[in-house]
Amino acid sequence: MTAGEHPATPATPAADGQDAPLTRASLRAMRAARHALQVPPVPRDFRTDIEGMRAIAVIGVMLWHAGVTLLPGGFVGVDVFFVVSGFLMTSLLLEEGRARGRIDVPRFYARRARRLLPAALTALLGTAVITVLAIPRTRWGDIGGDILASAAYVVNWRMSGQAVDYLDLSRAPSPVQHYWSLSVEEQFYLVWPLLILAVLAVARGRAKVFGVGVWTLTAVLLGGSLALSWWWTQTSPAQAYFVTPTRVYELMLGAVVALGARTWAMIPRWMNAALGWLGLAMILSALLLIDKEMAFPGTLALLPTVGTALVIIAGFTAGGAGPDRLLRARPLQWVGRISYSLYLWHWPFVAAAASLAAVGLGGPESLPVHWGLLAVLISVVPAWLSFRYVEDPVRRHGRLLSRRVGPGMATRRTLLLGINCTLAGAIAGMILLSLAPPSTTATQAAWRIPAIVDELRAPVGAGTLAGGGDESGGEDGEGSSSGDGDVAGATQAPGDGAGATGPGGGAGPDGESSTTGPGTDEAAVTTAPPEPPEPEIPDKLGTLAVPLEQVPDDTPVTRPEGCHVGLAQSGVGVCEAGDPEGEVTVGLFGDSHAGMWLTALDEIGRERGWRVQTVTKASCPPTQDLELPADRAPESYDQCRAYQPKAWERLLQLEPDVVVLSSAAYSTSDAEMAAALGRRIDGLRQRGILPVVIRDVPRPGFNVPDCLVSNPDKASECAFEREDAQARAGTGQLELLTTRPGLPFLDLTEAICPGTVCSPVVGDVVVWRDSNHLSATYIRSLTDLVDRELAPWVRASHVPEPGLTGLIESARFVEPEDG
């Protein structure tokens, strides 16, 4: 029988006490019901133990979001909800099969829509309002897209994609991020009844066939999802956390409890009670012992989910001897009753509190606990109002509507209500998108450079600094990088204690003055420039080259699209830039901190006739034989490990004359990173390729554009100490210089942060587009300086032997004493 089809009247007592005549449809319905009658009965009575577990789950989630460290595993409350949902929904479907001999899928969907969607829509609308009132406009576009995806219940896949996008790692979480779990459940509700209906159709009234079929289906889904969850969590934990396939087994555990109801009812009371207390202990242990650094969900989620299943099993016969004695406490019952609304409303307030506390915007690195607890307590008010005036009335109205207009009409009206709720939520997301600032630098960017930058050829950004270099140092690019007031493009940065050898002369690793380098007069002696004056950090922002709200989109434009490899991929892409017919090939190799220099190299290449080939991957440095920890799990970053040898082979196929390398900060020691970088540089030199390293830029540690939006009249609040910022950047790069004297090393720090305090805005250009990358516009303003420092090295790569050999040998690798 197809979903939604109503059978003819079965042979049941008629109103006058006579049996109604049996029809062919009636007989088919009775045969279909035979196996359903053998489905284990699931008690339909109210379960106080389940209500109490809901309370524990939502309290754990709320306190974890509030930053309470006593519950490091509070997020496992979501896993408790999954098991409960799997049990209740499977029970509902089996009971309908028992009572009606079929499953009315539209009716099932209507009940879910009535139960979930009106309350979810109310919270989405409230979140949109909270966003406008408390969150910077730079984030409205992203949040509007999240609300749109949440309304369609696919936001978990959107979050999965963002979780592996390097550009989004530093951004604050979305105020609707918690809707990912609702999306998982809705996708389950959409598919699970259809699968059971398919088994019902195959069984054709045969009880044994149905029993074997539904148990087999459940076992396959549970085992397959568990195996996939383990594998996915090991390979890509950020993705695995959000996607539906890794969570299906948790819902299937609930289905197993529903299918085995007859067996659980036969377990002795004392044994069921013991199982229940064991299950509750497992849930509490998960809340206390699991933390976000562990690989989750994977098999680790079995601790809270199996515990939840045991508590539900105990509820069949244990009675007061089981954990129900604790879970039926009145406070837990009240919290459990409104747990859905609490879950919907608490997180937007926590996200707003983080924004108001300037977390990641120059304020604290994480939300202070007292802020988090206050946000959670405030959220109880709209949650209770939503339950009292939306969730509960709509649920009760469904029963009244069914009596008044009949089940069929009630189903149609309720489905229409669900569609309207989805459309209203989508409209709210689109309105927020329309209110967000336009991303002109993203939509109007051409392959060359955003037009706005070319129009502002007058000095902006670094060009406004003394020697910042929008005026070329000579048409051959060999102008001096030192002198009074000049920015020492490749010289020692004041106070950092480390030097570099550059084409224009500079300090060696030992701090002594050095004049060696191509394009310089060995007889000339260059003195270190004087300490630069502290730049004035404006409080009032003038007219910016790129509007503040568009700065997050001020990123390098790559060709072909997708050539910069993301976190989740291990394939190799090559971005093409510069002069495609150029006789000189310059390679750019590294992570996104190397890739951001593409903006400058593209223009230099077109002007000088260089073919620029970029081989970059997010969060994957140009190292060799380095086991790199992933940022979000203790597991290895396997995609980077798989990518590096393939990228190296592809880079060599490009036959570059010079390879420019750079990399960001990583969770490994300076010595390990320096050694791994050194091995890669050694490989280039052995093949006669000249390596040039660009020092990583100072890392603010917070999102600069968001900070400026939050401090419109006091931009100086977004300034930060250069020494601290440099300590957070470029793992192992200065260590590399101690093992490779004479390594071509371009240090542009003075043109990015000319003073002991770094300004977020230089020359009407926002310097950083997020918490660690320079904006493309600011790098554009550094083009002439990069040209002046890099061009002599590129020319030197064409010095006939033995000149080049001598140049490379002068910077040969020196093994450190500790090996």
Image (cartoon, rainbow, N blue to C red):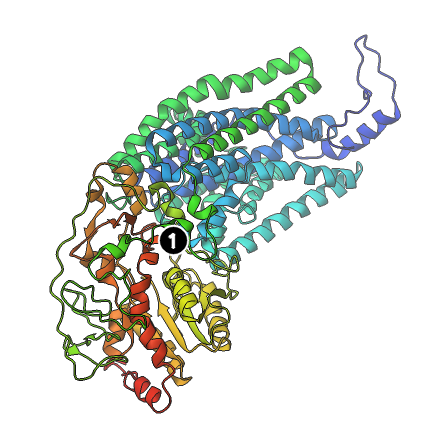
Where does label 1 land, which residue? 454
Q: Is residue 604 above or below residue 297?
A: below
Which part of the image, by quadrant, shows the C terminus? bottom left
What's the residue at 51%, 58% (across, down)? 562
What's the residue at 30%, 71% (across, down)? 477
Amino acid of disc 1 = Asp
Give coordinates of residue 346: x percent, y percent: 38, 31
Q: Is residue 644 shown to the viewer in this render? A: yes
Residues 271 and 344: in front is 344
Q: Is residue 722 left or right of residue 294?
A: left
Q: Is residue 490 left or right of residue 577?
A: left
Q: Residue furthest top?
A: 16
**Image quadrant assignment for residue 578:** bottom left
Q: Is residue 457 left or right of residue 580?
A: left
Secondary-structure class at tag 1 = helix
Residues 426 and 691: in front is 691
Q: Is residue 527 above or below residue 715?
A: below
Give coordinates of residue 673: x percent, y percent: 32, 70
Give coordinates of residue 709: x percent, y percent: 30, 39
What's the residue at 26%, 57% (across, down)? 463
Q: Is residue 212 above or below residue 644?
A: above
Residues 242 and 340: in front is 242
Q: Is residue 283 above or below residue 638?
A: above
Mark 1 crowdedness (10 Å alpha carbons): few <14, some 14-19, many ≥20: few
Give coordinates of residue 750: x percent, y percent: 21, 61
**Image quadrant assignment for residue 78:** top left
Residues 145 and 174: in front is 145
